[in-house]
Image (cartoon, rainbow, N blue to C red):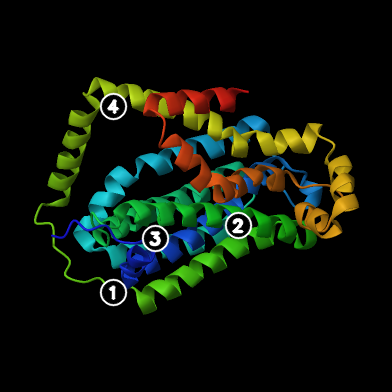
Amino acid sequence: MSTEKKSFFEVMKSYNKNFRVASIMELFERWAWYGLFAVLALYLTGSTDEGALGFSHIEKGQIMGIVTAILYLLPMITGVIADKIGYKLSLIIAYVLLISGYYVMGEVQSYTMVFIVFLWVAVGAAMFKPVASAIITKNTDESNSTLGFGIFYMMVNIGGFIGPAFSSTLRTQFGWKIVFLQAAIVIGINLVILLIFYKEKDRVKNTETLSEALKSSLTNMWEAVKDSRLSVLLVIMVGFWTMFNQLFYTLPTFIEDWVNTKALHDSIASVSPWIASVMSGGGDSVNPEMLVNIDAGSIILFQLIVSYFVLRMRHVSAMITGFIIAAI
């Protein structure tokens, strides 16, 4: 194998069709997910007079916290299933669950039904997550995997930015139901892309039974967490995600209830009426999800610059710096 370094453009040209399809599908899936998740706290606790559900903040926390926790645990199982039945079939199942789940979630109103249907959506997302990453892994090699995963996660943030931006305008002008319809339509586009463009080539079938594969997966995870350094890292990551998720769990409702965003809207409008209109969804105050969305926008704009400086730092020093900045 040649060790000659490729130029940026040579690396970009080296990615095959399945890599590009997986990256595009990731963008659309994150568009649908964050297009809903960024406004979900507002929908769950908002006034019923405005088409929202009027749940308490405790009920909102239970729905968003418990279901999301289950979502991030399920790939341990869904990843094994995907290896057994194939990636394309797994994605078809995921998209059918997501399309139906997103649509039905906008139609139900009781706490129990919203919880159940959101869990239904979570199962679909959990079917998608390990497959998308696995396709990227299998369609990159040592020469292009670093940039490949960089592109993949850039798609995550682009989708995570576009979704809330669309939802902000849609819910302001047309009401809450269209936010759920948007998510279902976007996943529908993904299903079309999958059926037309994705080709599963030379799949190596797993000869283990499902129970054997699950047992093997759990054994490997147990062996991994026995590494004390990995366990410490996992505890740190739990702390980070506890902090980061407040962007979606508590910050939108805090802004909605306690922050006068009309003053901010008027200040922006004095400089650029168009930006003010985008930030407010056509209203007269900045929507909370658009303030939250500054995070995804900043990642898109500054990821390469920050990565450049972080590469020059020790990993621990970089993490501590990030913790200090986040705390401030």
Label 3 crowd bin: few (<14), some (14–19), many (20+), radius 10 Å: many
Q: What is the C-alpha distance between the residues marked 1 and 4?
A: 36 Å
Residue at the spot x=79%, y=47% of the render?
Answer: 286
Residue identifier under label 4: 230
Sequence-first disc among 1 and 4: 1
Up/down of 204 relative to 220, above or below: below
Residue at the spot x=51%, y=58% of the render?
Answer: 101
Q: Is residue 280 left or right of residue 192?
A: right
Q: What is the C-alpha distance between the residues marked 2 and 3?
A: 19 Å
Q: What is the C-alpha distance between the residues marked 1 and 2?
A: 27 Å
Q: Is residue 92 visible?
A: no
Type of residue at label 2?
Gly
> Answer yes or no: do the residues labelled 3 and 1 have beta carbons within 8 Å?
no
> Answer yes or no: do the residues labelled 2 and 3 have beta carbons within 8 Å?
no
Type of residue at label 3?
Ala
Q: Nearer the viewer, residue 145 or 64?
A: 145
Q: What is the C-alpha distance between the residues marked 2 and 4?
A: 33 Å
Up/down of 61 relative to 115, above or below: above
Residue identifier under label 2: 163
Q: What is the C-alpha distance between the residues marked 3 and 4?
A: 30 Å
> Answer yes or no: do the residues labelled 1 and 4 have beta carbons within 8 Å?
no
- Between marks 1 and 4 in the image, the one whose residue lies nearer the viewer: 4
Residue identifier under label 1: 199
Sequence-first disc among 2 and 4: 2
Type of residue at label 1?
Lys
Quarter of the picture holding the C terminus: top right
Residue identifier under label 3: 94
